[in-house]
């Protein structure tokens, strides 16, 4: 019974909430792990689940050495599921009502300096079609702050080089318009005219902007490999360089040059301003380090 209820809940998240397949997959993994635990305890109905069972599950997660972040995510998934049971099936007792999640230390995201970004963006070889593609992707990523899934999912009709905007379909299928600068426009234009035609060859109907050497859509995993390779060529630590680091750098560099938080929120596609506020902490930490380094009493 619980398994079928989880399936119904996941359908609601997909159809009504518009969650992406990747997010649904993560929710399914978290909830099914909880169901496996309950099955070992002989529990199969929602009303049988009490707070002690949830506490035992949390203890089991700690025994399996799950991180605090993973435990918090599992709890979040369970809270949503039990809210669904209360609304749709009249479950009267919420076993998570009095359970608090682990305290998380909020890690500041890694941000590259302007010089490091410049080195990374110069790493691709523009004399090859793949190099032109990689150059265009990195320039666009830093110019727009896109998520990697948004970048590889871009279609040809969603970018307008004449106006200098890209139409992005973000989380929950929400669309936003993001401006791109002259340097990114030039890199994308070179890729479209000199690189992409040699990659797509006979696959003329392919509408994804960025493709692999076979002319098929580029995957997230492949882009991760590309940015790691570029990091090595740029003399940066590949373990620290991810697509999200360029997104963090995009946001932080905008704020450092005077952009307001609301604008950065819109550009990043954040639903809540609180998510964007992490970058103000990055700014403060940067200022603190500068003060310590250069002030005579720092």
Image (spheres, rainbow, N blue to C red):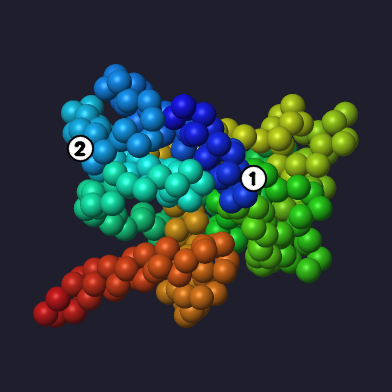
Instruction: Report the disc number at residue 15.
Output: 1
Secondary element at image label 2: helix
Q: Position of residue 92 (x, y in %)?
A: 36, 48
Q: Nearer the viewer, residue 79 or 102?
A: 79
Q: Residue at x 36, y 56 (%)?
A: 109
Query: Tag 1's secondary structure?
Result: helix
Quarter of the image where the C terminus is located: bottom left
**Sequence-first disc among 2 and 1:** 1
Mark 2 and mark 1: Cα distance apart in space: 33 Å
Residue 240 figure quarter: top left
Q: Looking at the picture, does residue 56 appear above or below residue 143?
A: above
Q: What residue does disc 2 label?
A: 52
Residue 249 at x, y percent in the picture: 45, 60
Tell me if I can see residue 115 in this picture: no
In the displayed structure image, the side of residue 106 where residue 1 appears, left or right: right
Q: Is residue 21 left or right of residue 279?
A: right
- How many C-alpha atoms fall within 10 Å of the one at disc 2: few (<14), some, or many (≥20)? few
- Residue under the point 59% across and 39% down: 11
Residue 39 percent location from the top left of the image: 34, 21
**With respect to residue 277, does 57 lie above or below?**
above
Of labels 2 and 1, the one closer to you: 2
Quarter of the view holding residue 238: top left
Tell me residue 146's x, y (percent). 58, 55
On the rendered structure, is 126 left or right of 32?
A: right
Q: Say which of 249 and 97 sits in front.
A: 97
């Amino acid at each position: 019974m619980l398994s079928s209820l989880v399936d119904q809940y996941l359908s609601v998240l997909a159809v009504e909430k518009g969650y992406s397949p990747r997010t649904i997959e993560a929710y399914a993994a978290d909830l099914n792990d909880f169901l496996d635990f309950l099955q070992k305890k002989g529990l199969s109905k929602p009303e049988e689940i009490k707070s002690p069972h949830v506490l035992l599950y949390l203890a089991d997660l700690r025994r399996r050495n799950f991180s605090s972040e993973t435990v918090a995510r599992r709890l979040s998934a369970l809270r949503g599921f039990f809210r669904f049971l209360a609304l749709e099936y009249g479950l009267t007792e919420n076993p998570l009502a009095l359970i608090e999640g682990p305290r998380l230390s909020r890690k500041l995201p890694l941000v590259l300096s302007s010089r490091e970004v410049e080195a990374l963006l110069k790493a691709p070889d523009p004399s090859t079609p793949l190099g032109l593609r990689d150059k265009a992707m990195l320039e666009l990523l830093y110019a727009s702050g896109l998520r990697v899934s948004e970048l590889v999912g871009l279609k040809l009709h969603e970018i307008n080089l004449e106006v200098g905007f890209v139409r992005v379909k973000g989380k929950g299928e929400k669309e936003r318009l993001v401006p791109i600068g002259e340097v990114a426009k030039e890199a994308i234009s070179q890729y479209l005219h000199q690189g992409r035609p040699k990659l797509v060859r006979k696959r003329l109907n392919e509408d994804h902007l960025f493709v692999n050497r076979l002319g098929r859509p580029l995957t997230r995993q492949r882009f991760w490999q590309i940015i790691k390779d570029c990091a090595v060529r740029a003399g940066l630590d590949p373990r620290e360089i991810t697509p999200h680091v360029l997104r963090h750098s995009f946001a932080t560099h905008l704020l450092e040059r005077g952009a307001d938080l609301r604008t950065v929120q819109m550009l990043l596609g954040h639903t809540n301003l609180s998510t964007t506020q992490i970058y103000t902490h990055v700014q403060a930490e940067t200022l603190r380090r500068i003060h310590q380094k250069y002030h005579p009493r720092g």
